[in-house]
Image (spheres, rainbow, N blue to C red):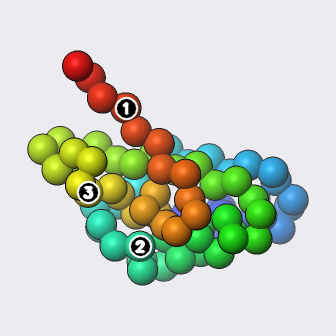
Amino acid sequence: IIDALIRGFLEGQDILTLSLGASRGWSESTSAVVASRIAALGTVVTIAAGNDGTSGSWYTSSPGNGIDVISVASIDK
């Protein structure tokens, strides 16, 4: 994940989108920090919020919980 984020950034991509995540709700994970730093440099980073069932909006997956990262979710109602 980290290699892909860095590679996309170095190749000059305008938007990086990841539809994945790990069940770690902390923005200090390595992948979340890398995503946050890339976003802070002006690249749009969108990442899936996760699929953690009953935890819902209170628990996003990493790296989708990074600072300045756009975390994308949906609900089935």
The local crowd at label 3, few if under 14, some if 14 to 19, many if 20 or more residues have their Cα within 10 Å, is some
* Sequence-first disc among 2 and 3: 2
Residue 58 in view: yes
Type of amino acid under label 2: Ser
Type of amino acid under label 1: Ser
Name the residue at 59% across, 70% down.
36
Name the residue at 77% across, 63% down.
42
Tag 1 secondary structure? loop
* Sequence-first disc among 1 and 3: 3
Please name the residue that numbered disc 1 is placed on: 74
Residue occupying the far left of the picture? 54
Please name the residue that numbered disc 2 is placed on: 27
* Sequence-first disc among 1 and 2: 2
Name the residue at 56% across, 59% down.
69
* Nearest the eye: 16 or 73: 73
Q: Residue 76 appears in which quarter of the rendering? A: top left
Q: Are marks 1 and 3 in contact (CB under 8 Å)?
A: no
Q: Are marks 2 and 3 in contact (CB under 8 Å)?
A: no
Position in image of residue 30 (x %, y %): 48, 79
Disc ID at residue 17: none
Tag 3 secondary structure? loop
